[in-house]
Amino acid sequence: MNEGQDSAEGERAGKAAGRAAAPARGPAGSESRLAMVRRARRTYRALGEVYYYAHPELDFENPFELLVATVLSAQTTDLRVNQTTPKLFAAYPTPEDLAAADPAVLEELIRPTGFFRNKARSLIGLSAELRDRFGGEVPGRLADLVTLPGVGRKTAHVVLGNAFGRPGITVDTHFQRLVRRWKWTAQEDPVKIEAEVAEIFPRKDWTELSHRVIFHGRRICHSRKPACGACPIAHLCPAFGEGETDPEKARKLLKYEMGGQPGQRLKPPPDYPGRPAPPLGAPAAG
Ligand code: SF4
């Protein structure tokens, strides 16, 4: 099914039912698989209009920096990582440098990201592996990346998608929550979620899909209080009403550029419509 055709058919079905985005229902009242796939693809396109500037929210200049930043991003915000990495990358620009780091010095540098002892161990370990097994380069294959200490499938996909242009679906906490709210899958295991969502979208869209979904999760469709009343894809969402539906109250829940606040990157891409994040120690985001 081509996307234009999918869109036209979806709109026709919506008009026939008297609403813009009426999902087709199967015999048991549940949405058919085909209708869900159409709705999912329309959601992807609608998110693309809202977040035309969607991008990875970690600052990096090369695959090694992205790998390190992604390992540091576990259990913390990308903002905190971006505020921490400038000093880190200045001190240890290559895998060889980081492999030879004094653990106590490294721990101090990355302390703001939390779990700094484990993360320091992973960074030194993965850097030594890059030096010894991969000629000091980050490998561009999933099978190799996941053999590195502290690197799982999610981290590997972030690196492959954004530093190597190899499409991948990043199933982080936002992605898991949103695709389940949208009933694209009922799975709970990240690997199964990845597999089911991969069936819905062409491979070329996987990385961009990840960015758009994660952007929406961070800005509007929050875990505890989604801002449904200010949500531009509410008409496509079966979970509308799970959060705040009053438009004025919902608007106050918006984050980053959507809420008039700085973003997460200190060096955002040129098309980013918001303000860059402040460096570490600067006054907190408004
Ligand atoms: S309508 Fe609510 S639950 Fe649905 S995507 Fe928007 S914010 Fe999330």
Image: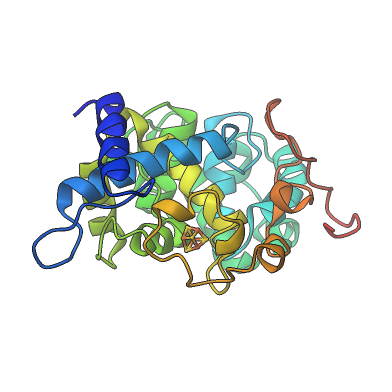
- Residue farthest right in this picture: 283
Q: Is residue 225 above or below residue 43?
A: below
Q: The C terminus is located in which quarter?
A: bottom right
- Residue farthest left in this picture: 27
Residue at 17% in and 46% down: 34
Colour mode?
rainbow
Residue at 40% in and 57% down: 237
Q: Nearer the viewer, residue 255 or 3?
A: 3
Image quadrant of residue 157? top left
Q: Is residue 29 left or right of residue 68?
A: left
Residue 152 visible in the shown view: yes
Q: Is residue 82 above or below residue 270?
A: below
Image coords of residue 189 (percent x, y): 28, 65
Q: Is residue 184 left or right of residue 262?
A: left
Residue at 33% in and 40% down: 41
Residue 95 visible in the shown view: no
Image coords of residue 124 (percent x, y): 55, 51
Q: Is residue 229 left or right of residue 109?
A: left
Image quadrant of residue 92? top right
Image coords of residue 244 (percent x, y): 59, 71
